[in-house]
Image (cartoon, grey):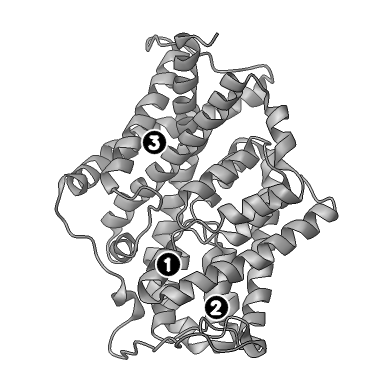
Amino acid sequence: MVTSQEILEIVVTSMRDAFLAVTVFVAVMVLLFSWLQYATSGRFVEYIQSKKKLQPVIGALMGLTPGCGGAIVMMPMYARGYVTYGTVVATLIATLGDSAFVLIGAAVADSSFIAPMIAVHVISFIVGVGWGYFVDMTGTTPSKPLGKFGPKVGEDLVPENDEDTSPLDDLSREVPEGLGYKILHQGFLFWWAVTAIGFIFAILLLVWSGQDADYSLELTYNPLTLDGFITWIGILGTTLSVILYFAQKNWFADDTEATIGDKLHSMRETMVHAASETAFVTFWVMIAYLVFEFTMLFANITEQDMSKYGDGVFAVIIAATIGLIPGCGPQIIAITAYTKDMISYPALAANAISQDGDALFPLLVRHKAASLWATVHTTIPAILVGVVLMVAGVSF
């Protein structure tokens, strides 16, 4: 018989651990990479236009940057005819979207995840570059999805050429109105303050765990005790993140053209949307924790029991299929499942290659056929690579 106390403990523990084990580390990484995008975006546009032969490599590198911003800025460039379709495919294959931050956070908290984190990024990059060049060499486009080997099934993309403006100017901007906008733009500093405090305690928890292998944070609600204070910091941080998540009104994708456009034009907006992006990750990580914990509780099974279903060809295909879903939310759940040892490494790699993060949405607006075929053209190598890794017995 499941008691209300057990349910409460699962909810509180999930909120606390999501913030202290993931959010605080994700926040640092998101802010760093958001600042780099803000500082270098203009020079990047000029560079990629002048390096046609290197575009799939550059696109894959942009996709490799954690978060969806690097991949999203490639979409208006494709719309203008500045980059090839193979470059778009390379970018989408290489990106892990916001789920990359989940892996990074896991690696920071547990060194055993460093190797799989690096490996999955390297594999995604190599596959992205190779498949991107293959797509271009075979003449594959949205209107010729089979390249030279198949018929033309639609119209080619008509470039939106405008030499007087940057492709980044094509990115829309947020409208500064509404309750959600006010909550986000007035509450982000408080969120950053709580996150900074949480980051300090998260580092201390790592140090204490390193000094004592048996150390564990007790679940107590007394804020006058150290464990109780840390617990309330975790609860407060996750609560604020959930508020920011709902304030942004993007349920499955946090990065949009508008948010990227704002971030590339203002450092303040970079901090605002770094908070928003991290809050998005926090919400979906918490959902993943709750799903896993309640499944084990009500089904009376262990993590070892659940992991039995996360291996084999079926797991690879399911993981790649989840990658077909636009947006980062479902992908964060899939990556979190790996950090919980519930899916195999080949399944992780298949999802990483297949998923497009939030970058598919701006492509969908500009060219529906391109967005449709891009998902297909990224899922094919995802399943192939996942099966190869499984047959080869690759695991971490």
In the rendered image, is residue 118 in sight? no
Look at the image and tell me in which quarter the N terminus lies.
top right
Residue pointed to by mark 3 = 196
Callout 3 touching callout 2 (CB < 8 Å): no
Residue at the spot 40% in from the left edge and 45% down from the top edge: 280
User: Label 3 amino acid?
Assistant: Ala
Nearer the observer, 99 or 28: 99
- Determine the CA span between mark 3 and mark 2: 38 Å
Q: Is residue 134 above or below residue 39?
A: below
For residue 87, which numbered disc appears in the image?
A: 2
What is the tally of numbered marks visible in this picture? 3
Image location (x, y in percent) of residue 166: 33, 81
- Estimate how packed mark 3 is, as few (under 14), some (14 to 19) or many (20 or more) residues with alpha carbons within 10 Å: some
What residue appears at the point 43 percent right and 39 percent down from the top-left corner? 282
For residue 160, which quarter of the picture?
A: bottom left
Q: Is residue 107 left or right of residue 281?
A: right
Q: Which residue is mark 1?
A: 72
Query: In the picture, which quadrant includes the C terminus?
Result: top right
